[in-house]
Amino acid sequence: MLEIRNITKTFFPGTVNEVRALRGVTLTIEDGCFAAIIGTNGSGKSTLLNAVAGTFLPDEGSVFIDGTDITHWPEHKRARLVGRVFQNPFAGTAAEMTIAENIAIAMKRGKSRGVGQALSRSVRDEIADKVRALNMGLENRLDNPIGTLSGGQRQALTLLMATWVRPKLLLLDEHTAALDPKSAAQVAALTSEIIARDKLTVLMVTHSMQQAVQMPGRVVMMHAGNVVEDYAGERKKGLRIADLMRAFDRVRRRDLFDAAVANIVVPQYA
Amino acid sequence: MTLVVGAFTMGLILSLLALGMFISFRVLRFCDITVDGSLALGAATTAVLLSAGVPPWAASLGGFAAGFLAGFTTGILHTFFKVQELLSGILVMTALYSVNLRVMGKSNVPLIDTPTLADLPEKLVKKLAGGDSVSIAGWPVPARDVAMLATVTLLVFATALLLQLFLKTNLGTTMRAAGENPQMIRAQGVDNRWMQVFGLAVSNALVGLSGAMLAQYQGFADVQMGIGMMVWGLASIIIGDALIGKNARGTGLLIVGAIMGTILFRLLIAIALRWGLNPNDLKLVTALFVFVALVVPTFAAKLGIRIFGGRRNA
Ligand SMILES: Nc1ncnc2c1ncn2[C@@H]1O[C@H](COP(=O)(O)OP(=O)(O)OP(=O)(O)O)[C@@H](O)[C@H]1O
Ligand SMILES: [Mg+2]
């Protein structure tokens, strides 16, 4: 179970470039729950995922996984519990190393790494089996540099790597956004399959409302560093894209209203 | 012939340096300047230990260990104190100049009549040849030189093999990935900073070992002997890349390339000196060579040169 308690994060505080990216986000994701996060550009979705992954320390608030306070754990320590797929297909793998080597590194996530041979016979067989199951024909290219693959293929492998050792939490940040439609659909299908099979707890940022509505579990909407909507249970079941559009409109109108009020009020008090 | 044997011996000794730099430059993609200091440190440590009567194998190991510490320091400065890559190397290299003077107590330690790693092989060679010199292609070559050549050949072979095996271990693959994509390796649960520290330590340990052998071969250790070594190593790696071609894949080929590059470079230098190149101009010529390879991209592209082993992500 993931508990995010009142997290705030401000970039460049006290300067003209100040960005209040997270303004007190509280969110609890139950075990085995799939939560899609949607929201406008710059609403703080990636920042929230980064705060959970430990890319930076939050200014305030705390993060718990299964009751353990991990707020002050460094990124690499959290990786024992958290699997991650980035938006950039190049970010999750080492391009010049082979497919098999990349996967072998992921097989050791959260475990000690000694001077045993990385690609022993049994490890190779295990890798070949799982890669064959992807049905992408990659099992014949295990010794090719992973950089020779397409973005979609790399993203599929990154997903495989992030979930090879079952993570307590899987973070997906628009991991299909940089792919062509066909690859994106393929990776999305693979994602659903793995999540269902391993009953993973997932936090997924997406720009596709279609995807958010279709996936089981919750839909969380963010805006300006806050969680503004949280569709779960019965509310989620009846959720349609039109409802999300309306919710988007609401927060946008509120922004306009705030700005208009400010325009009227500020001169009066200035 | 003595000249060729000498160039080969020197090339092999310096290929230990190139192997060390292969780890920092190619595997970690870290431009490490500590090298100039750690080579002299390895030589100084070994020379002092030999003078104190320590057996050659232990003295050489001492040079290795001293280099390890030097690289470790550079790594810690960069990762934990956030000193820039180049600057952390420069700081350690500069500090090592004084350290080396301290270790030796003076600027030069001659090794006269002290044992070396080549002693045992020398006895063997003498026994086999039945005299003080061996005839190679009709030319007499002192048994001592042949023994030295055999010793360093063995040493380089063993080191290259160990390095290649290491790069295929769990730790080795992780280190390679950390050099290429630190973000990825953190996401896989590894503190990439320790990978860097460890890699730099091993890299400089090999450089120290190179210095240890250099001292034994030349018969002295000098506080100046490391100057310009990094650029030499770089030149060797560049030539190695040109030799094995740009499509070369796999660490094994790259390692072999680095060794061949160093030997070829030494041979070229021996020839150039023979033709009347002033030894004082050697470093200028080397620097020019590296400059040309670095700056003229079309030239580099034609030879298929990758100076820093490609891009580093995030
Ligand atoms: N490392 C950083 N340094 C400075 N500002 C940042 C940093 N990361 C994010 N921000 C800022 O914080 C705000 C929230 O960004 P974030 O990336 O979380 O948005 P997002 O919801 O993921 O948007 P998108 O849909 O475009 O990915 C933005 O204004 C962004 O410029
Ligand atoms: Mg984002």
Image: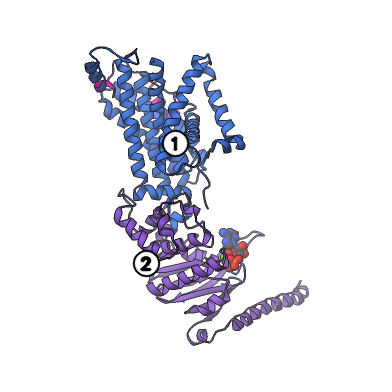
| In-image side of B294 versus A65 (left or right) | right
Q: Which quarter shows the N terminus of chain B?
A: top left
What subunit carries mark 2? Answer: A
Is A79 rendered above or below residue B170?
Answer: below
Answer with the quarter of the image where residue A11 lies: bottom right
Where residue B134 sits in the image (x, y, percent)?
A: 29, 15
Where residue A252 sits in the image (x, y, percent)?
A: 67, 77
Q: What residue is disc 1 on?
A: B21
Q: Residue at x 41, y 42 (%)?
A: B251
Is A125 rendered above or below residue B14?
Answer: below
Is B277 rendered above or below residue A46?
Answer: above
Chain A in the picture: what colour? purple
Q: What residue is disc 2 on?
A: A166
Where residue A255 sits in the image (x, y, percent)?
A: 68, 76
| In-image side of A131 versus A91 (left or right) | left
Where residue A130 sits in the image (x, y, percent)?
A: 37, 63
**Viewer-side residue, A270 vs B10:** B10
Looking at this view, name the residue that lies furthest to the right: A267
Q: Residue at x 53, y 17 (%)?
A: B280
Distance from Cα at disc 1 to Cα at disc 2: 38 Å
Q: Give yes or no for residue B112 being in the magenta stretch.
A: yes
Q: Is residue B72 visible?
A: no
Is A190 rendered above or below residue B271?
Answer: below
Which amino acid lies under the numbered mark 2 shown in the image of this protein?
Arg
Which amino acid lies under the numbered mark 1 shown in the image of this protein?
Met
Residue at mark 1 shares a chain with residue at mark 2:
no
**Viewer-side residue, A215 vs A135:** A135
What subunit carries mark 1? Answer: B
Highlighted magenta segment, given as a residue range: B97-120
Q: Is residue A28 visible?
A: yes
Q: Which chain is tinted blue? A: B
